[in-house]
Every structure is written in C-alpha cells, then in structure tokens.
Amino acid sequence: MTTTLNPPSWNPFDAEFMIDPYPTYARLRIEDPVHRTPLGILILSRYEDAFQLLRDPTTSVQRFDTDRVVPEHMQPLQNRREERGPSILGLDPPDHTRLRKLVQRTFTPRAIARMRDQTAVIVDELLDELGDVDQIDLITDYAFIVPFTVIHRMLGLPDTDIFMVRQWSQDLARTLEPFLTPEQVTAAISGGEKMDEYLLDAIAQKRKNPQDDLLTALVEAEEEDDRMTEEELLSMTGLLFVAGHETTVNLIGNGTHALLSHPDQIQIVRTDPSVDENMVDELLRYDSPVQTSGRRLTQDTTISGVEIAADEMVLTALGSANRDETFWGPTANDLDVTRPEAGRHLAFGSGIHHCLGAALARMEGEIAVTRLVRRFPELAHNGEDTMNGRIILRGRETFPVSLGTPV
C-alpha cells in the first residue's frame, strides 16, 4: 500500500515543526523550493536562492510594519515603533550605510580580541560557581548569563544592574517575533520604557565621564564629522542587549544540545582545541539560532526559475539553507566539527545586512561551549528540554542537564 504525503508547508505554528523543522525543510528544498506559505509570504529553502536574495542590493528590509494589518492588541507596540523610528535592522541604504560605518568603528577585531580574555574570566567564574551543583537548567543558569554579562561589561555598565536590565531585554526580545500575546505586548512596552530611561541616563554619564568601554566608543564614534543622534544611540545600545544576547543564548543552548546528541563530536571538542573556531561555525550551521531573514523585492526578480513580482515579501529559511545537500553535500544533516568551510553558513545572514555582532557571538559561543564541555566531561541530558516557541529566534526555553564531577 502506498502512502501519499501531503504537500510540504512552512508552518511555524505546527508543534512538530517547532521541535524539529529540518524534515520539512528537506521536503521543501526538493518539492517546492520557492514556497508560498499559508501567510501568503514566499520562503526560499535552498542555499543558493537564499544567498542570491540576501546579497541582492536592490532588495529592502523595510518590510513588515509598512503594510501589515496589526492585531488590535499589538497596536500600542506598533505605535511605539513608529514614534521611535526603525533600528538599523529596518534601514536601507543610505541610512543603513551611514549608521553601520559609525558602529563598525567600535566593533573592531581589536575590541573583540580585548574582550576575549574577559569573556574567558566570566565563563570560568560561572563554571566555578556551578562546580558545586549537579543539576542545572543550562539556559537559565548558564546560556543566558554568559552573553548578557559580556555585553553589560563591554558597555561599561554596573554589574549590580545586570538582572534588572536582563528582564527588560527578555521582554523586548519577543518584539523581534511577528506575533505576541497581549501580556507580552504589555511587558515589552513597559520594559522598553524602563530600558530607555536607564540607557539615556547611562549615555549622559558617558558624555560627562568618558571611559574605556563600548558605550563611550559609541557615543564618540565619528565619521566625517557625523555622529549618532541621541535616538540612534538609544536604539543601537538597546539592540545590542535585545538581539545580541538572545541569539548567543540560542547558540550556546542549541550548540551544547547538538554536541551532547553526537558523542563522537563532543569527544573531538574535548580533546582537540584546534577545532574550536571551526566548531562554533558548524554549530551555527547545524541548528541556526536565527531561522529566517526577510526582504522585500523592489523590482521583478527570478529565483530558481520562478518569476517574483516587485513588492513581494520573501523570507530566506536560513536553517534550511544551512542543511542544503546541493551545497553542503551528502553529509549536510550530520554534525561535523571538522567540516571544511563550515564558516560559509548563513546563520548571520549575508550581504550588507550581515550581522554586525557576528565576531562577538562566535567568540562568546566558542568560549562558553568549549569550556563547559571540557570542565564537565560527564555533562549529560537530565530530562526533556522544551523549545522557546519562537518563529525567528530558534532556541530552548529549558534544557535540564547534570554536570557531573568537574575536572
């Protein structure tokens, strides 16, 4: 008897898809690579198609808020966005080009290298504290703490404020998703107001008393007599907290989960430090913290032989592109921390909107994951993990593990 499968469909609200989207991605790449979703948006699942769109200079990131019908309970959040203006994530050239030049003056390889030793200290101190505890939630007790502490110290903000700012950031991070509950909208607006007040005060303090830190560097960043306005500074600093820490949390959580599920690969990491840099790129490829990135077409475009009209919204399925057998070969679904050219993944996007904090996220993920699995050779799953239910930022809400005896 032959069983006929239903046509594949990208449905991020499906419980099975949320847990493991990769079988659906595999079918889409073969059967319907330029797929019209139930929401009416096109989504690309193949690597070359996603790469083409992300690097197309004629596309726009000003996509959702301009014409989307917003549910009534989300209108207050929409109003706040319009009052604040878009962050760099929602800007096209020349505005995007101008802001990116200013920010790139602070996110230099030298600045990231300087933070490497401090990140190692933060991770080691946390692992020392965990050494007396056998069972933890890897997300709450480790993955959230590391990147948030790093960015907080990079900005030169008091450690005593970390937990307060972290709660605001978590509430705001949900605004990166297309759909929120009424309770999440209320929390995001409240968190946003408190975050703005806090950061405005911090910016004013850095103007009066400049320090050797990232926030001072952002305040003083200048390009041909141009500096960021107060609103731009506020938006950029808030984005570092909201987008910067959330994606790295997912990198640490997803990456550790992947290694624990592949004993041969975690053993390589534990015994061979030469794979560290390549390992973090392979973890990003294997289970991408950011699953989709969208563009609006500004002109008629042909992708994989399909003609797409100008003004269409098109999503790239980054998680699918990073598992595309036609690009990565027959081992695309395997985890291989020694994989050649793992760094060609699209987890950070591509083109002019390639993630500004990519080098920082790689560094944090590399140190956090390698030091964890080497300090605790008996690290193991200790119950069922749960997913965070996000459409764009794929990660785990809970991840119970037993640490075992540290070395």
Image (cartoon, rainbow, N blue to C red):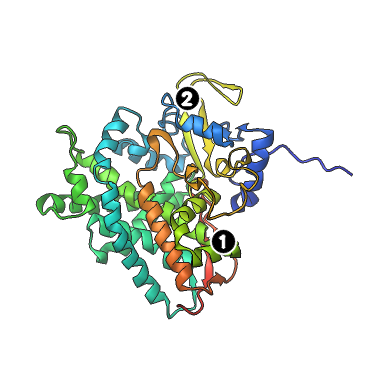
In space, the residues marked 1 and 2 are separated at their CA atoms by: 41 Å
**Dividing the image into 4 quarters, which one contains the C terminus?**
bottom left
Residue annotated with mark 1: 265
Q: Is label 1 or label 2 in front?
A: 1
Dot 2 lies on which element? Answer: loop
Q: In the depicted view, which residue is nearer to us: 283 or 78?
A: 283
Earlier residue among tags 1 and 2: 1
Q: In the depicted view, which residue is nearer to us: 285 or 164?
A: 285
The label number, if any, that marks residue 154 in the structure image: none
Q: Is residue 67 above or below residue 16?
A: above
* Residue 64 placement (x, y as % from top left): 45, 33
The type of residue carrying mark 2 is: Leu
Residue 271, visible in the rendered structure:
yes
Q: Residue at x 50, y 67 (%)?
A: 271
Q: Quadrant of residue 382?
A: bottom right
Residue annotated with mark 2: 297
On screen, residue 127 versus residue 159, left or right, reads right
Q: Residue at x 60, y 41 (%)?
A: 324
Q: Is residue 117 above or below residue 24?
A: below
Dot 1 lies on which element? Answer: helix
On screen, residue 28 versus residue 258, left or right, reads right
